[in-house]
Image (cartoon, rainbow, N blue to C red):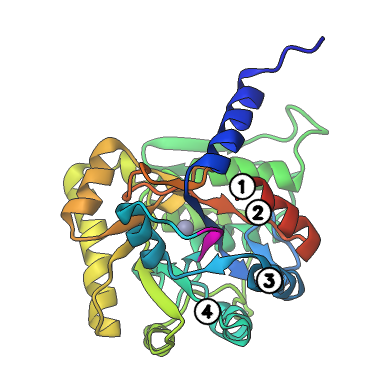
Amino acid sequence: MRIPGRKALLHSARLVRSKLVKHGLILGYHRINRLSWDPFRLAVSPESFAQQLEVLQKHANVLPLHELAEARASGDIPPRSIAITFDDGYADHLSVAQPLLEHAGLPSTIFISTGYLGREFWWDTLTSLVSSIDPANPLSVDAGGSKFEWRPESEPGIHGRSTLLASLHKFLMPLSADECLDSLKQLAESSGVIRTEKSDNLAMTELEVIQLASDDLTTIGCHTVSHPMLARLEPGQQRSEVMQSKQTLEALTGHSVNGFSFPYGSQSRSSVQLVEECGFTHACASHNDVVWRNSNPFCLPRIWIPDCTGNTFHKLIRRWL
Ligand SMILES: [Zn+2]
């Protein structure tokens, strides 16, 4: 007889609890588009997303995130409650995701990193650079007091492009925005890659944020200024990242911005407390779970949705609801 592991037992306990206790679900997306190379699996294709929205229309009670957060606080989460969220603030949200959401008549929240308005996110610059680099050549990058070394000749055979990308991503993620930018410049210079075409991976501009804010079905939320690993920053830097992004978005939209999302899901007890002190009413993290009555409103769990058909998506949400 197979003895169930801890993970399986926890899953079963959660399923039993979900039949007895009111709960909701927050879906996490980054962008809706078709990408030629999507190594971090940030995109859901427009076709898949349209099918997923149809499933939600038929089988869920989709409500704005702030309403789900309020329902949690009152202890009365309506059955099959789901909120749709997007992180980062890609410009294609306006041309691809929003029309599909509007057609389906479903509300959503988009969390925006204000330091990237009109620019390319560092991970997309990195992906683009690595797609043009020959991973058979050695590379080195200095940043933040540490050094990234790529020596493919020492272990031939395992140093493919995907490994190079994953290694550089891991190296760059904890760096400050300036260090990251400098590292990307070093990488471009040392590998001789010159990018001439306009990026397809830009974040929304200020004007696009203003345009999106006028949509009744869309709520704008904060995702810091420079998209750092918040929990690794000094308290003063954390406060400035959180407050500056809130102020910028409130000035642009003319509305109070009450929702926050932690970049990379990076949070600590003090950063969660800081978000509450900065005047937000709720915040999303990135751990997988449903929203319970006793979930911390400043650390709400989310389920990240893959690029999958309506049928697969239906099975996925049924498991959680
Ligand atoms: Zn993000």
Residue 306 x/y as whole percent: 68, 56
The reply to whether the residue tagged 1 has its Cβ within 8 angstroms of ligand 1 is no
Q: Quadrant of residue 272?
A: top left
The magenta segment is: 79-84
The foreground one among 82 and 36 is: 82
- The disc, 4 or 3, on the residue closer to the chain's N-terminal end is 3
Q: Looking at the picture, does residue 171 appear above or below residue 97?
A: above
Label 2 to label 1: alpha-carbon separation = 5 Å
Relative to residue 300, is residue 239 drawn left or right?
left
| Residue annotated with mark 4 | 91
Label 2 Cα neighbours within 10 Å, binned few <14 / some 14-19 / many ≥20? some
Label 4 Cα neighbours within 10 Å, binned few <14 / some 14-19 / many ≥20? many
| Residue annotated with mark 1 | 320
Q: Quadrant of the N terminus?
A: top right
Label 1 to label 4: alpha-carbon separation = 30 Å
User: Was residue 81 drawn as part of the magenta stretch in this picture?
Assistant: yes
- The disc, 3 or 2, on the residue closer to the chain's N-terminal end is 3
- Label ID, residue 317: 2
Q: Nearer the viewer, mark 4 or mark 3?
A: 3
Relative to residue 80, is residue 269 drawn left or right?
left
* Magenta region, main secondary structure: strand
- Label ID, residue 58: 3
Q: Are marks 2 and 1 in contact (CB under 8 Å)?
A: yes
Q: Are marks 1 and 4 in contact (CB under 8 Å)?
A: no
Residue depicted at 24% across the width and 85% down the height = 254
The foreground one among 113 and 9 is: 9
Q: Nearer the viewer, mark 1 or mark 4?
A: 1
Q: Secondary structure at mark 1?
A: helix
Q: Secondary structure at mark 3?
A: helix
Label 3 to label 2: alpha-carbon separation = 13 Å
Residue 85 x/y as whole percent: 50, 65
Label 1 Cα neighbours within 10 Å, binned few <14 / some 14-19 / many ≥20? some
